[in-house]
Image: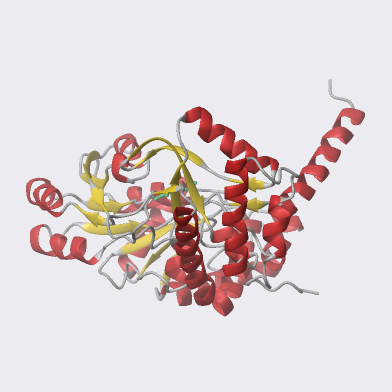
């Protein structure tokens, strides 16, 4: 049995790794950081509590632990998210992007046997979507995407031949903004009963910060996804719509697919959203500017940065860099890690077989990384490749170039 001394060692390990994490530069595009304000609820008693009475019905306090702060979810979180998405209906209950995906599909996919169309994973769609559709009893069809544009011929054919219940656009790996309005037009033309959902898990912060277009403005019926990738919030999910009937369908699905919605994280989401309204647009624009600058600097230094023929490398937070075979990529990743710089290796990015660094500058931007920090970061990549300045201080040099964070640093 593990005794208390062993557990103390575990605590010590946590503490020392926390110090390292605090000093690190994290470039994983699916991750971000919680601000001190948004982190507050996670160490409160609300972490232990259920909260079901989201209608604030005075006769329905079966679980009372969340009663005193209920409005932080029902008013603050919903209100702020509504404003950010410009959508009167929000469901803040999913616990992650995949949880939101399940609810959206179950709520909008219609009767078993109907067809759900998603993006071919080989062209950037999420790996789970098609299989999830089948597990929920739907038939699945996929359409490829290139440079953010859905293959219109293939989509037109699927719409005409199968009249799907739902087109679920789940672009995960993309350097391009997803073009939604053409998809909405095709649906209107060929299968007007089909619903359109955009899962913008990766680009949520860029959309809510208005640096990328809002899918609801482009004709999507619903949208949603994770709140912890380009959006600097807790590990949660969210669903938005402007249509009350669809909101109810999502709510009905949520009711039977989720019981604990992680109350403390939901409060954190409310605070993160309230803070984001102060700086969201500046942050989102800076993320894209930083990603472009980083691509440019790396390419100028001879790195193999994924780009279109016209040199355009990215319009999102993602930057893709090919280092070489698996061994070289792994060595490079480890060398950066030894310097406190954490990168993400993927092996299935569209059009790039083999291991590739899928980098995101969202978290670096959130903590205050602007042009100077991006220059320092590109320099550290060069150092790692050349094997020079191997003093373990790479992340410190980058962080020294950071300015004030976007979040409220002083919450005392
Ligand atoms: C489009 C899309 N949907 C769902 C998910 C899963 O999100 P989570 O990891 O929050 O469950 C992702 C993750 O990358 C995604 O890109």
Is residue 233 visible to us here?
A: no
Image quadrant containing the N terminus: top right
Q: Position of residue 19 (x, y in %)?
A: 79, 49
Query: Is 113 located above or below residue 279 in the figure?
Result: above
Q: Position of residue 398 (x, y in %)?
A: 67, 59
Query: Is 111 located above or below residue 134 in the figure?
Result: below
Q: How many marks are shown on the rendered structure?
A: 0
Which residue reaches farthest right? 5
What colouring style does the render use? secondary structure
Q: Residue at x 58, y 49 (%)?
A: 381
Q: Residue at x 33, y 46 (%)?
A: 124
Q: Residue at x 63, y 43 (%)?
A: 336
Q: Position of residue 132 (x, y in %)?
A: 35, 39
Is residue 254 visible to us here?
A: yes
Q: Nearer the viewer, residue 160 or 344?
A: 344
Which residue reaches farthest top? 1
Image quadrant containing the C terminus: bottom right
Q: Is residue 40 left or right of residue 188?
A: right
Q: Is residue 224 left or right of residue 138?
A: right
Q: Position of residue 271 (x, y in %)?
A: 63, 69
Q: Is residue 388 left or right of residue 103?
A: right
Q: Nearer the viewer, residue 353 or 68?
A: 353
Quadrant of the rendered image containing residue 407: bottom right
Quadrant of the rendered image containing residue 208: bottom left
Query: Is 299 located above or below residue 391 in the figure?
Result: below
Q: Nearer the viewer, residue 215 or 294?
A: 294
């Amino acid at each position: 049995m593990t005794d208390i001394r062993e557990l103390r060692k575990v605590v010590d390990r946590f503490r020392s790794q926390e110090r390292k994490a605090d000093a690190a530069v994290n470039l994983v595009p699916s991750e971000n950081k919680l601000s001190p304000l948004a982190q507050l609820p996670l160490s409160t008693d609300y972490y232990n509590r259920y909260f079901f009475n989201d209608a604030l019905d005075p006769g329905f306090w079966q679980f009372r632990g969340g009663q005193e702060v209920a409005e932080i979810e029902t008013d603050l979180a919903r209100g702020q998210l509504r404003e950010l998405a410009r959508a009167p209906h929000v469901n803040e209950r999913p616990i992650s992007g995949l949880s939101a995906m399940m609810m959206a599909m179950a709520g909008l996919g219609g009767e078993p046997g109907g067809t759900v169309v998603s993006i071919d994973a080989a062209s950037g769609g999420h790996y789970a979507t098609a299989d999830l559709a089948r597990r929920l009893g739907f038939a699945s069809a996929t359409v490829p995407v290139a440079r953010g544009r859905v293959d219109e011929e293939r989509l037109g054919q699927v719409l005409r031949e199968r009249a799907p219940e739902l087109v679920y656009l789940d672009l995960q790996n993309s350097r391009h903004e997803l073009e939604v309005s053409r998809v909405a037009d095709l649906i209107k033309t060929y299968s007007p009963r089909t619903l359109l959902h955009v899962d913008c898990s990766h680009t949520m912060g860029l959309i809510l910060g208005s640096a990328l277009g809002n899918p609801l403005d482009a004709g999507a019926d619903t949208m949603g996804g994770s709140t912890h990738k380009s959006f600097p919030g807790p590990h949660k999910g969210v669903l938005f719509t402007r249509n009350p009937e669809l909101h109810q369908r999502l709510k009905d699905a949520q009711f039977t697919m989720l019981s604990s919605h992680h109350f403390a994280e939901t409060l954190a989401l409310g605070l993160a959203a309230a803070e984001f309204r102060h700086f969201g647009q500046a942050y989102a624009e800076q993320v894209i500017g930083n990603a472009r600058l980083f691509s440019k600097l790396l390419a100028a230094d001879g790195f193999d940065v994924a780009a279109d023929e016209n040199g355009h490398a990215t319009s999102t937070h993602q930057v893709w860099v090919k280092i070489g075979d698996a061994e070289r990529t792994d060595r490079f990743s480890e060398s950066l890690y030894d310097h406190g710089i954490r990168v993400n290796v993927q092996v299935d990015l569209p059009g790039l077989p083999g291991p590739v660094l899928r980098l995101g500058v969202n978290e670096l931007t959130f903590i205050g990384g602007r042009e100077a920090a991006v220059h320092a970061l590109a320099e550290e990549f060069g150092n790692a490749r050349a094997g020079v300045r191997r003093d373990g201080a790479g992340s410190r040099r980058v962080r020294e170039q950071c300015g004030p964070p976007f979040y409220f640093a002083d919450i005392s």
